Amino acid sequence: MAVQISPSILSADFSRLAEEAKAVEGADWLHVDVMDNHFVPNLTLGVPVVESLSRATDTPLDCHLMIEDPDRWAPQYVEAGAGSVTFHVEAAAAPVRLAREIRAKGARASMALKPATPIEPYEDLLPELDMLLIMTVEPGFGGQAFLDIMLPKIRRTRELISKHGLELWLQVDGGVSDATIERCAEAGADVFVAGSAVYGAQDPAQAVRALRGKAQQ
Ligand code: DX5
Ligand code: ZN
């Protein structure tokens, strides 16, 4: 499994998004958290900002939609230039149709699970996806403590991916840092989102390299 790092601009300075995106060039993705104040109790940014960001950086955008009605909105994020679009299964009315639409428009389709959402009911959907995101905090805010109790779910999901012989990537998001990334990697994650651990560091690009090194061990 190739390790990929996706720094989250939620922890960046929103008045300098283009520079903050450039500060992590060398990362595999730039994670963009879209929040609507309904699905989660926080509000961030939308399609126009994603469009501008996609022009401002060569790093592909990994858009994490924490919004109601992703069936309606997710395709617009593909059109705005996202390379990967993640919707929450708890919010999607028709996850299979939506994943197919995201792929048909040319982006990677990804589905996220909140901490209390089990993977097992969705085993048969996995072939429709390019990535599965297991939240390791309750979505809504950066800087929260990693939920160790998610490690068994990461492990079980990795087993399902292997059992079906899928190429699916397994992303973790929330509280990923120097102190927790090895546990996530050992459990089977291969794409790591990190907000405060990257943008809270003196040198964000160096923080990305350090996280990659730890995940590869
Ligand atoms: C939280 C967001 C995360 C957030 C992670 O709901 O989905 O992407 O930016 O921030 P850290 O890495 O600080 O927990
Ligand atoms: Zn996120």
Image (tube, rainbow, N blue to C red):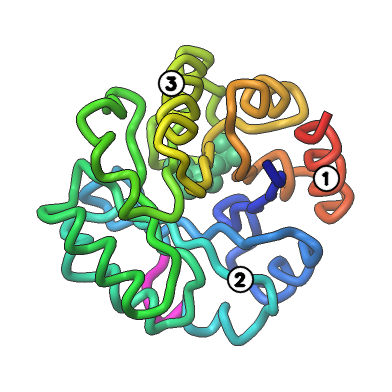
Which residue is denoted by mark 3 in the rendering?
A: 156
- What residue type is disc 1 on? Ala
**Disc 3 crowd, CA 10 A, few/some/many (<14, 14-19, 20+):** some
- Between disc 1 and disc 2, the foreground one is 2
- What residue type is disc 2 on? Pro
- Residue at 52% x, 46% y is 169
Tell me the magenta residue range.
45-49
Measuring from the top left, give residue 200's x and y in whole percent: 74, 44
Task: Report how far apart the C-alphas of labels 3 and 2 lie in the structure.
Answer: 29 Å
Measuring from the top left, give residue 62's x and y in whole percent: 52, 62
Q: Secondary structure at mark 3?
A: helix
Front-lying residue, 190 or 23: 190
Q: Quadrant of the N terminus?
A: top right
Q: Is residue 144 magenta?
A: no
Name the N-terminal-most of marks 3 and 1: 3
**Disc 1 crowd, CA 10 A, few/some/many (<14, 14-19, 20+):** many
Q: Is mark 3 within 8 Å of ligand 2?
A: no
Which residue is denoted by mark 1 in the rendering?
A: 207
Q: Quadrant of the C terminus?
A: top right
Name the N-terminal-most of marks 3 and 2: 2
- What residue type is disc 3 on? Arg
Task: Report how far apart the C-alphas of labels 1 and 2 lie in the structure.
Answer: 19 Å
Which residue is denoted by mark 2 in the rendering?
A: 60
Q: Is residue 69 left or right of residue 31?
A: left
| 15 vs 119: above or below | below
Q: Secondary structure at mark 1?
A: helix
